[in-house]
Every structure is written in C-alpha cells, then in structure tokens.
Amino acid sequence: MQKRLAFGLVMVLASLATTAGAQKPARAASPPLPSLPVTLFTSEFPVRVTAVATGLSHPWSLAFLPDGAMLVTERSGRLRIIRHGVLDPKPVDGVPAVYDGRLAGLLDIALHPKFRENQLLYLSYSKARADKRSTTVLARARWTGTAMADLKEIFVANTWSESETNFGGRIAFDRDGFLFLTVGERQEQNRAQDPGDSDATSRPDLEPPFIYFVPSLATSGIMFYTGDRFPQWKGNAFIGAMVEGRTSGTGHVRRITFNEKGQPIQREPILAELHQRIRDVRQGPDGYLYVLTDEDAGAVLRVEPAQ
C-alpha cells in the first residue's frame, strides 16, 4: 500500500509542481530566516529548527552519504558537500555544465540503491541546445569520495522548449531498483488542452492523482517518515510547499496522515512561521527531518523534537 501511495503522490507532485513558475510577475522576496535555533509548534508537540548550513544559492536537493556527509545541489550548477556540519566553501568537481535559467539548472541528486558497492549517483539538470531550447537530462556518475567522475548522460527528455521553467527532475527508486524521473510540462499549458496531444483524462496503465491541493502549494519534495525520532509521525508523508495560491511568504511543509485504509485524513502545515519557499524535505539517517529553502540565501535546516 505504501508503495502505491508513494508513486501516486509522486505523480501528482510532478503535475502540481508545474505551477511553481506559472506566475508571470516577479515574486516578492521571502523574509529572511529568523534567528536560529527556534522552537515552533505543531498540532502534537513542539519542534526545534536549527541551521545546518546557510548562504546556499537556491539549494534544490540533498543526498546523505554513508559516511554522514551531505551532498547538496545548488540550482546555478554547483554541487556542495557538508562534512561534520561544515559547508565546504569549494564546490565539488566533475559536475556537468547546466543551463541556468529562471527555474532551470542543477536539480535533483540521488544515490544508487547499491551505492556502498558501486559508488554511483544520479543527477538531473536542464540542458540547452543551439536554438536556445532546453530540456531535462538525467546523468549518472561515480563518486570518488571528493568529486564526481565518469559522468554520462543516460536520458534526455523530448520536452525541448523555450520556457525557462517547470523541468520536473525528481528522481526516485522503487523497491526493485527501477529509477523514476519526473518531467515537467515546461509551462506550455496550451498543450494540456490540445485534444490531439493528451487523448484521455485517464488510462488503465497510469496511476491517477492520489492527493491534490486547491489552491496549489507549488509542491516540491516528498518523503514518508520511517524513523524513531518522531514516533507519532511514523508513516506520515511530508511534502515541501514553496507557495500557497501564489501568495508570497506562504511556503511550508505539509504533513499528511493516513487511516488504516491508506486514505489521507489530516493535512497539517508545519514550519509556516519561517515564511520560506521549501524546495525539498528529507529524512536523515539520524531520524531528523532536513529541509531546503529555495531562496537567494538558501539554507539546509534540521527539524528535531524540542527538549
């Protein structure tokens, strides 16, 4: 059931995330983060939010290495590493050149399910060609311990467009080791209304949306909590929200609980007091929540139970 829920949510997130860049006017800047650490309240207990790293330029995704270090992508095309709680000022070598546009750039990062054995990792990013059209690319590389090597493009989406937004790019592995990649609609909304392009609203071989949000949350990352630090939250889904209904400063993390039948029964916004665009949310190997803020001066935040 959880696998079915996960991929149903991945599909709807891929669809809803396309609204993130749909607004034409320049968005108002989010307010700066408050002084951290700070204690915030949820419906069940208080949580403590601390800064793991600050001063990142629009961090997009992160991955936890077996040695405890964190790899963080910056949309402008840099890959950063955090070791022992310290952000290395020097970007990681071996990252491919990316097309850096409005919402284009270096996107997701994910480790191979057998990373300890093969040291392989995957990156998604935007790429442009001579006619100034761009698309979403998936590449594989080998982690040397300090850099990426042997990078190879393994998939190039056929979504070449002049748009600088809505590339998708989320990477997920299922239990059988198959890799899934989301691809955005590139803000070409007219194509969604073209009967000669999408000939039905549903198909037997496609999973329909499991959850959707009105107004849109400009959804980003998704994670099912399986740790022990927050026992009350085990089995809950956590979804990053960059903005609610195009209202600036409304980013948060949406916590969703399910009943015994796997149906959603509660949708609680948390971390809303930070007023930040939340680009990703992950569970760390320590059982805490890690959140990325998609800001000019972005941050990696850790959420833990308040003592």
Image (tube, grey):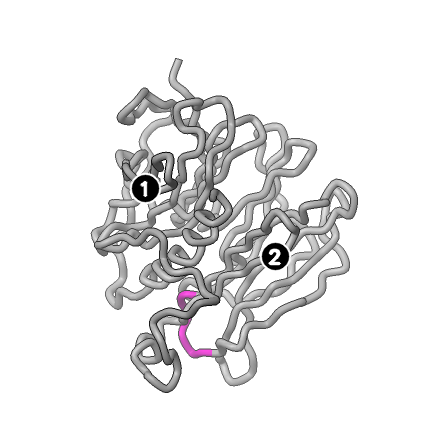
- Which of discs 2 and 1 lies nearer the camera? The answer is 1
Q: Foreground residue, 303 or 179?
A: 179
Against 292, residue 9 (above or below) is below
The crowd level at tag 1 (other Cα within 10 Å; few <14, some 14-19, many 20+) is some
The amino acid type of the residue labelled 2 equals Leu
Q: Tell me the SS state at disc 2.
A: strand
- Tell me the residue that label 2 is attached to: 179
Residue 158: x %, y % from top left:
53, 77
Residue 103: x %, y % from top left:
42, 62
Against 127, residue 168 (above or below) is above
Quarter where residue 90 is shown: top right
Q: Foreground residue, 8 or 95?
A: 8
Residue 135: x %, y % from top left:
51, 72
Question: Magenta segment, principal secondary structure?
Answer: loop
Quarter where residue 178 is shown: bottom right
Residue 264 image label:
1
Q: Tell me the SS state at disc 1.
A: strand
Start-end of magenta stretch: 161-166
Against 70, residue 203 (above or below) is below
Residue 89 makes an appearance in the image:
no
Q: Foreground residue, 226 or 142?
A: 226
| Residue at the spot 37% in from the left edge and 35% down from the top edge | 260
Image quarter (top left, top right, bottom left or bottom right) of the C terminus:
top left
Disc nearer the start of the sequence (2/1) = 2
